[in-house]
Amino acid sequence: MAFTVQAEIKKDVLLLRMQGELDHHATEKIRGELIELMEEQNIKHIVLNLAKLDFMDSSGLGLMLGRYKHLQKKEGSMVICAISKPVKRLFEMSGLFRIMVIEPSEDQALMRLGVAG
């Protein structure tokens, strides 16, 4: 299955709904676009909705960790929400749950950042 991402901006929050398989090919393709979008829109926070992400490899983790570190420098945050079972297992094995905020739903993630609705 191909990878798709839907982006929505709410104030200084970038909401990304990821679907399909986030592998090294998809990661290479979106990394530059994501960095450019974050700078152009002065993004301080990211919400990653991973409900429909079926697969992710280490390059996907690297992409998320890189954006997380970038946001930390801006005193921002990354919130992961609605994580699918296969991707949740990868997060558990990698230890990313210890540093990233996890919310059960997109609405709760957006509320945490003050941009719900």
Image (spheres, grey):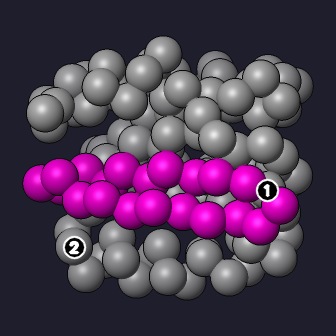
Q: Residues within 10 Å of mark 1 (few under 14, many from 20)?
A: many
Say whether residue 70 is left or right of residue 86.
Answer: left
The extreme top residue here reads 104
Image quarter hosting the C terminus: top left
Circle 2/circle 1 CB separation < 8 Å:
no
Q: Residue at x 77, y 34 (%)?
A: 87
Residue 42 falls in image quadrant: bottom left
What residue is shown with label 1?
Answer: 21
Say whether residue 115 is left or right of residue 52.
Answer: left
* Magenta span: 1-20
What residue is shown with label 2?
Answer: 41
Residue 91 falls in image quadrant: top right
In this rendering, the label closer to the viewer, 2 or 1: 1
C-alpha span from label 2 to label 1: 26 Å
The extreme front residue here reads 1
Q: Secondary structure at mark 2?
A: loop
Q: Residue at x 30, y 59 (%)?
A: 8
Q: Position of residue 56 (x, y in %)?
A: 81, 49
Sequence-earlier tag: 2 or 1: 1
The amino acid marked with disc number 1 is Glu
Is 47 situated above or below 19? above
Q: Position of residue 37 (x, y in %)?
A: 36, 77
Nearer-the-camera pick, 69 or 85: 85
Say whether residue 90 is left or right of residue 50.
Answer: right
Q: Residue at x 60, y 76 (%)?
A: 30
The amino acid marked with disc number 2 is Gln
Q: Residue at x 64, y 41 (%)?
A: 52
Is 1 situated above or below 27? above
